[in-house]
Amino acid sequence: MHSAFIGRNTLGGSKLPEYWPTLVSSFLIFTLIHQVIAPILSRAVAPVSYTAIRSRRTRNTWGVHFTSQCHVLVVVPVALWCIREQARDPEWDKRRERMFGWDERAAHINAIACGYFLWDSLDAIINFTNIGYVIHGLGSLAVFAFSFRPFGSYYVTRCLLWEVSTFFLNNHWFLDKTNRTGSTLQLVNGLCLLATFFGVRIIFGILISLDFLVSALHEYKDLPFFYVLVSLISCFTLQGLNWYWFAKMIEAHHKRFEGKSRESVKLINDTNLVQNDAKAGTSW
């Protein structure tokens, strides 16, 4: 790690060109996974469920979740490794390093994430279903792109831990599409989804956002207003979406398994009724 920022003007000295190959390769690989690899593997692993899908939009969503899962499995372990290595370096305890410091290890994984969010943003726009997905993709892309100024690289690497909850979200969706809706496996996965979403996106997200604000206030004299404004807007917008989605997930989880419980009670009552009728018939 070395400090790559001295004064206001160095924000113009972007480090992105050095990582263009990684970013572009990431974008192309995730596009390839979405368009080619996901359909092939899905037909092989879940032939009945996948071929039963007739809607083009649903098949595209299947591919999106497949691609998202690949992204999670790559970036989360590497981000954890980078965070562990940074924790061993006392330089990262300094506010200035957290705002303007540079770590080449983290830069590579941030470039991969940048390529992913570029693909994600384009898919959300081209195959539009919800404005929230577009905002999330573009906001994430902006934040990760800014890290190459360099600006806030320390924080965006930690934001990759939000993707831990995405792993369970993708599982939840696939369980729905493979006729496991309301199963015990989906219940356990749903609880893991709620726990990780609340832990990494809500609690950890708030802590990271507050720490970013403290660092920004500490170094405000060297921060161009534009970067701070865009970063804060993206930060609070993404946090707002996290709270909104968390509330919707709780509601959906409650309705799904409450409905299943009611069906179970009805089935038990119907079974008891049949048994009572049978007994009554026998005694007659």
Image (cartoon, rainbow, N blue to C red):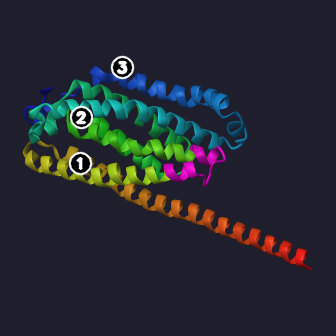
Measuring from the top left, give residue 85's x and y in whole percent.
Answer: 20, 29
Q: Amino acid at mark 1?
A: Ile
The earlier-in-sequence mark between 2 and 3 is 3
Q: Amino acid at mark 2?
A: Ile
Q: Are marks 2 and 1 in contact (CB under 8 Å)?
A: no
Closest to the camera, between mark 2 and mark 1, is: 2
* Residue found at the very far front of the displayed protein: 283
Residue occupying the point 18% across, 28% down: 13
* Residue found at the very far right of the displayed protein: 284
Measuring from the top left, give residue 270's x and y in whole percent.
Answer: 75, 70
Residue occupying the point 15% across, 35% down: 100
The earlier-in-sequence mark between 3 and 1 is 3
Asked if 271 appears above or below 28 in the picture, the reply is: below
- The residue nearer to you, when weighing 127 against 112, is 112
Label 2 sits on residue = 83
Q: Which residues are magenta?
A: 174-189
Label 3 sits on residue = 21
Q: Which mark is residue 208?
A: 1
The earlier-in-sequence mark between 2 and 1 is 2
- The residue nearer to you, when weighing 88 against 98, is 88
Q: Is residue 273 magenta?
A: no
Residue occupying the point 36% across, 35% down: 76
Residue occupying the point 47% across, 24% down: 29
